[in-house]
Amino acid sequence: MTACRFPLSATIAALAAVALVSLAPLAQADTLQDISKLLKQGQQAQALEKTDKYLAGKPKDAQGRFLRGLILTEMNRTPEAIAVFTKLTEDFPELPEPYNNLAVIYAQQKQYDKAKQALEMAIRTHPSYATAHENLGDIYARMASQAYDKALQIDSSNASAQTKLAMIRDLMTASSRPTPGKPVAATAATTAALAPAPAETKPAEAKAEPKAEVKLTPSAVKPNGPPVAVSAQPVAQTPAPVAESKPAPASASGDIAKTLDAWAAAWSKKNVKVYLSHYAKDFQTPGGESRATWESERAKRLTKPGSIQVSIGSLSVTSEGADRATARFRQNYRSASLKTSSSKVLVLVRQDGKWLIQQERVGK
Amino acid sequence: MKRQYTIMRLRTLAMAALVCGPLVAANFSAAATAAARYSDAGPEPLLARVFEHIEQNHLDVALQEVEALVKAYPNFHLGNLIKGDLLLARSRPIQAFGNIANAPLDKLADLREEAIARLKAYHDKPPANYVPRYLLQMRADQNYAIVVDTQKSRLYLYQNEKGTPRFVADYYISHGKLGTDKVREGDKKTPIGVYHVTGSLSRQKLGDFYGSGAFPISYPNEWDRRNGRNGHGIWLHGTPSNTFSRAPKASDGCVVLANQDLDAISKNLQIGLTPVIISNSIEWLSLDDWQAERGSLKKQIEQWRTDWESLDVERYLNHYSKKFIGDGQDLAQWSARKRQVGSGKTWIKLSADNISMFRNPGKEDMVVVTFDQDYRSNNLSNVMKKRQYWQKEEGHWKIVYEGAG
């Protein structure tokens, strides 16, 4: 169903090419891909012309309009870009990308309150959306910097100006996005509205790399410590995903409890190999980084000198089907430098009879 | 019996430590509960709520509260700093108060001091049924009195309610960069003693630095001069427009209030009349102790008056200390003159009206007494405003200074 992508990096291009061949009406995809290429080459005027032509035939098309917003942003036609993205948020309130890009533009204009609101909307639609989370973190940091300037009567704007928020270049369809527990009906509706696609795309989609947006700049602040310490405070407005779930059958939750104990034990023993073996192949890395980067980062953390103790408390498991479940628990982490207790959510999938972690995040 | 009204216990709070380091815990005494009737001027109630929420790890609510705080007081630097911390806490873990890179440490330290001073004052109010020991007696037309506690960075406004001081409000203040006990010009210290408001300078006559106005006070007083203390230009004044308040220790010796606070007290100030008593640490008395203290001194003053009327010069001179100096004369010269004058008197009628008695802050038992003296005798009459400094020596009140007030 991921009909239209604008692959801007080599890996994604490769993946998307496969997807595009099998999934989308070819002409449409070609046009959008051409526009994307033009934009990448800096030929904004041509890109815009082509987009306008494309949209003349499909005035409601989200992909085309999203691309138009990007082009206008790059052309510094900011008010028009704002108008395009704003209209997209009105017509497709379930899409986080237009909100995110609106926020980036507002942040450039130092309208941090507006940027914050837009990002909160992006996160509300998709609680696990990494780019929006990171951007929101940056917005908070900038607002903090503004407050500090006022408090200390200094000008720190130089320091903060260096962090640039990530504009999302690629409008994903809802089904390819990590959406734990998102009601199927809504997903289907969203996808249908965006790009109707044949039903047999389902298997392909499952294999698609979950991360599709291209980050222009790395996030400014890389937190230290284990994943639990990543955000000092989970964004409060994030609603718990609505899960059509019922309590897991006793056996499944028993298996999951055992899996998590083993996972925590491997972590405590600093057994990197066993620890990482608990993660599914399609694990969605928290920052959207590559699996390799994430693994080496985790390995580095785990093997830091000093003891680590991880234990799990108040576990509650809800299953979504036989092979998918969400585990919520208190993660108690203690190392030489840090002691935390935080709520943790893991989405687990059963593959070959083994429960593996597909998503990991802090929060409720 | 005198009593420090409470001693704050500082407690390090786990969460608050991240933001503010050691923070004042609400350690209410029984008396402080009665103090609930006190009015709250300024940002303290909101500030205290912000810290309570931080303490309980309700950072979202704390951020909402601090946003309300800086909305109400846009130039309140401390509020903005806490807001910055709470915002930053959403994007990464924070370690200390003021998490900005390259923050000027002195400014951060100032804001931290201000936070502690304000929270302490808010949580540790003077008991309702206690009065500052200094306000022994206000004369009937002294409508208000001001008492400053430099250690607490606090100014207390009292109203004269038929002779009894009644608390009206208290305000955050700044004092001298280098502390208190001013001795000489330019030492950047705030004087300690009994003074009064001597004038009023309007905003129009002053630069922005003094904010909404200034009220000079009577430093150096008689006792300062006698002790060789000099300097001048100690004022109560406001705050520049770019900030709501200044650090606890920020001035060149003046007592500095937020503009809204100066405006609030200024309507109560009477030029030449309103006492301003500056102390390092206010001593508080229960009303009973206060009554006893003022009663014993009043009796002494009355004794001095009747002994003067009695024409018994030696009995009259018995009220004067060996350390006495007045009109440039020491006790021997003073005694000689009184004996000489006394020999020509057949009658003396003396009245002392509108007596005010203000205890001088500090270790010495000393009281500044001011009154309207109407002296009549067979060969001379004189009406004057008189000031005496009475000091307790070996359990007896003695006059150490006397002159025109």
Image (cartoon, grey):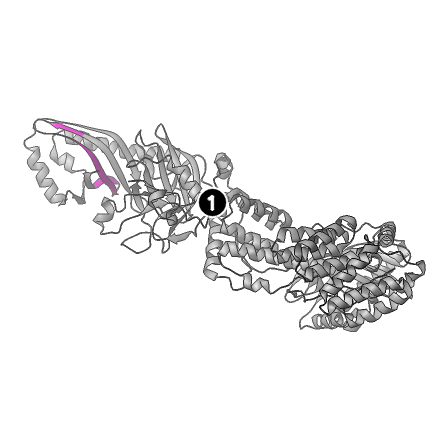
Q: Main secondary structure of the magenta part?
A: strand
- Residue A140 at x, y percent in the picture: 63, 56
Q: Which span of residues is magenta-colored?
A: B374-399
Please tell me how crowded label 1 is: few (under 14), some (14-19), or many (20+) other residues with Cα within 10 Å.
many
Identify the residue at horizontal 59%, vertical 45% (top origin): B65
- Residue A47 at x, y percent in the picture: 75, 64
Residue B384 magenta: yes
The kind of secondary structure element at disc 1 is: helix
Residue B150 magenta: no
Q: Horizontally, is A236 left or right of A284 in the view?
A: left
> Pointer 1: what residue?
B121
Dividing the picture into quadrants, the one containing residue A5 is bottom right
In the displayed structure, would residue B298 be above or below residue B181? Answer: above
In the displayed structure, would residue A128 be above or below residue B398? Answer: below
Identify the residue at horizontal 54%, vertical 48% (top origin): B25
Q: Give the letter of the chain under mark 1.
A: B
Between residues A343 and A148, which one lies in front from this camera angle?
A148
In the displayed structure, would residue B303 be above or below residue A338? Answer: above
Residue A262 seen in the current view: no
Dividing the picture into quadrants, the one containing residue A209 is bottom right
